[in-house]
Amino acid sequence: MARNIQTRVCIDDWFGPFDCQLDPHHRWNGWLSPSFTLDVTRELSAQTLRDADECGYECVDTIHVIDGRADSQDTVHLIESDMTHEVNEDGDRAPVALAVRIPWRSLDRGATATLSPITPAIRKAARKGKPTGRGAARAVVVHVRWMYLAEESDTAANIVRPNRDGLYSIGGFEWTWHFASWWCVCGERMDWHETECPCGMNRDENPKTPLGVATWAAGATLRRLVPDATSATVDLYDGFARIIDVFAGDTLVDTADDTGPFDCETLGEADEILRQALEETGPGGIEAAGWEHIPDEKTDRLYRVTFPAPRP
């Protein structure tokens, strides 16, 4: 029995990431077969069309979403590419294209849109107008494989019908969909639906900014010697981050090199982690990382930094 999960998928850095539903065990040559909501299908459509405009239709499948109403009159829509082909013996050329005829009033009764080549009569029908009506919103999704359409293949384009959950399966058993991922601050790469890292960090709690990540890393560095360290006082005088005090709860930890548990190398390493992140942090980054300003007579650059709680 299929066991669908909610996750995100992408195709390298090309398409996505997109929210979807899929069965992780239902694969094609190891690749995933996701299904998308109509809203996500619109996002996917926009990406395919941008890619086709930039790279050329001959190497990109495109997804098209055509909107109408349940009480609209039948309409005809033209989908054209930047590719051309010969149309007669004189060498005249025309765009590689197809027509989509949609019986809006019959869709709810099981009818489907139909695809056909473009003729003068179809082009004239397409000029008659857009879908009208006040009924419930409806949409037709078309998948076009242009390199095969140019070869007049019968399977070069199809109507993507929603499944019983209203989701659209696009690119399954064709495209190289794989799981989108998130990187935990501990350095572990996780599939999107794996919300808990083995280190204990939750995906939604995972720091998102460079300074947030650095705050976690600095805390982890200090905890190598003081496992109970919870926060620190940091001075940003002259643009350098320097840890002044370290706390374990409300208890001040001795940071003297000769009497306390820390050595200067560990404190210096934590300082450097914070300094590098501060160079990448724009306006508002300090506050976004949860750093709290501490009023002080000698400096206006003193902050209390609370480290994320250590995980069991």
Image: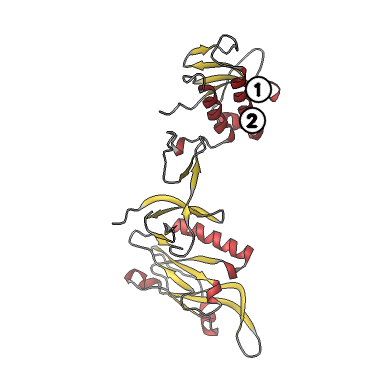
Label 1, label 2: how far apart the Cα atoms are: 9 Å
Q: Secondary structure at mark 2?
A: helix
From the viewer's side, name the closer residue of 166 and 158: 158
Specify whether 8 is left or right of 258: left
* Spot occupied by residue 201 in the image (x, y as percentages of width and height): 44, 34
Instruction: Name the kind of residue labelled 2 in the image.
Output: Leu
Counting residues from the start of the chain, the first of labels 1 and 2 encountered is 1
Q: In this picture, is 133 found above or below 301?
A: below
Instruction: Name the kind of residue labelled 1 in the image.
Output: Leu
Q: Are the two marked residues, 1 and 2, in contact with CB atoms closer than 8 angstroms?
A: yes
The numbered dot on residue 284 is none
> Which image quarter: residue 34?
bottom left
Mark 2 is surrounded, within 10 Å at the Cα level, by few (under 14), some (14 to 19) or many (20 or more) other residues, namely some
The numbered dot on residue 278 is 2
Q: Residue at x 33, y 71 (%)?
A: 110
Residue ranking furthest to the top: 259
Specify whether 272 is left or right of 248: right
Residue wearing tag 1: 236
